[in-house]
Amino acid sequence: MKSISTGFLLAVSLVSLGFSGCSPAETGQTVVADEADGGVPVFKVDPFWPKPLPNDWIIGEVAGVAVDARDHIWIVQRPRSLSVPAPPVMEFDGQGNLVQGWGGISEGYEWPAAEHGIFVDYKDNVWVAGNSPIDHQVLKFTRDGTFLLQIGQAGKTGGSNHTEYLGRPADIHVDPEANEVYIADGYMNRRVIIFDADTGAYKRHWGAYGEKPNDLDPGAYDPDAPAPKQFRNPVHSVVISDDGLVYVGDRTNNRIQVFQKDGTFVDEVFVARRTLGGGAASDVDFSPDVDQIFLYNADGSNGQLWILQREGLTILSSFGRQGRMAGQHYFLHNVAADSQGNLYTGEVGQGRRAQKFILQSQSEID
């Protein structure tokens, strides 16, 4: 792979990996890139995506990003922090044009006080979660915003082994094979929990390593200690690969754990293991090739996107840094890939934006 230094291209070589945080050597991972296999994906930011919004709308904290079957990009943002807020749920096409926006407080369901996480399932339904201290619910809508289902109840929680109530859920993913919704639960609870995606009936749940979760205070994160036996708040993301593996972002433990769908533990990888504070494993998604060769990890604390080889969970590269310029991140929170391999990110805190990173062809890199 050749290093690039022109325009907005933000690739990093394996030699000069990283602008901040920890290098792969500090994570204990081996850096491997095989030129014969095409090397590692390279991206550049599209500084003009999305396009200007109508009605003087402003986007607030982008707390979730998803891509649907049309390659339309959905975000959920927090309008309460703004004077001229856009709708909380917004759909854009690949060129950055706003398609529609909806959501917010209404009769028939409990809209979250702090929006967090969005997913568009195989039936084109849109799922939204929330993570305020009273948000213990996940909502399901049609793509035009018609309410369908609520799982959990605002203001009611029962700990990490309760089978009805949630605890500040962070993320959602629907498995089309079993029509089950997986919830990263979350900012209060320490588990993954699964329900029927149509009825909301409880199916199963598990904690770190597939074991029964508990809510005991694990104390401060120690990068030199043995791998924690429990998830640490927040259990921040969940996504399912095409070959049926469940990837869970254990954010402040700086790790991604992999499971079979029944909760059997498969493997784990630490990313920027020495990161403290908000943690380095905020969100994950896959490259869109048939084998989903690459795994992308959004590292909010260091403002980086890490690229891993999914087989073997080998860290290959990273790009990005903390900052407010195009291609930089200020509290990176989410990542999602479209069918062309482009990446979309969302930022919370004072970042308050979504960005698009275009996958470069080999001819554009050479």
Image: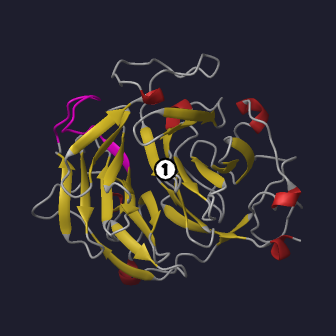
Q: Can residue 111 be seen in this view?
A: yes
Screen quadrant of the N terminus: bottom right
Q: Per the image, is 168 magenta?
A: yes
Number of marks: 1
Where 229 sits versus 169, above or below? above
Residue positioned 49% across, 50% down in the render: 244
- Asked if residue 201 lies left or right of residue 190, the reply is left
Q: In which quarter of the image is residue 109?
A: bottom left
Highlighted range, magenta? 155-171
Per the image, the residue denoted by label 1 is 244
Who is closer to the viewer here, 358 or 49?
A: 358
Q: Is the magenta stretch mostly helix, strand or loop?
A: loop
Colour logic: secondary structure
Question: What x and y, as percent, mark residue 51?
Answer: 52, 80
Quadrant for residue 42, please give it: bottom right
| Residue drawn at the location 39% of the way across and 83% of the way down | 54
Q: In which quarter of the image is residue 7?
A: bottom right
Residue 60 on image: x %, y %: 41, 62
Identify which amino acid the numbered label 1 is placed on: Gly
Q: Decide whether residue 146 is among the magenta residues.
A: no
Q: Where is residue 201 in the image (x, y as percent from the top left)?
A: 19, 47
SS for callout 1: loop
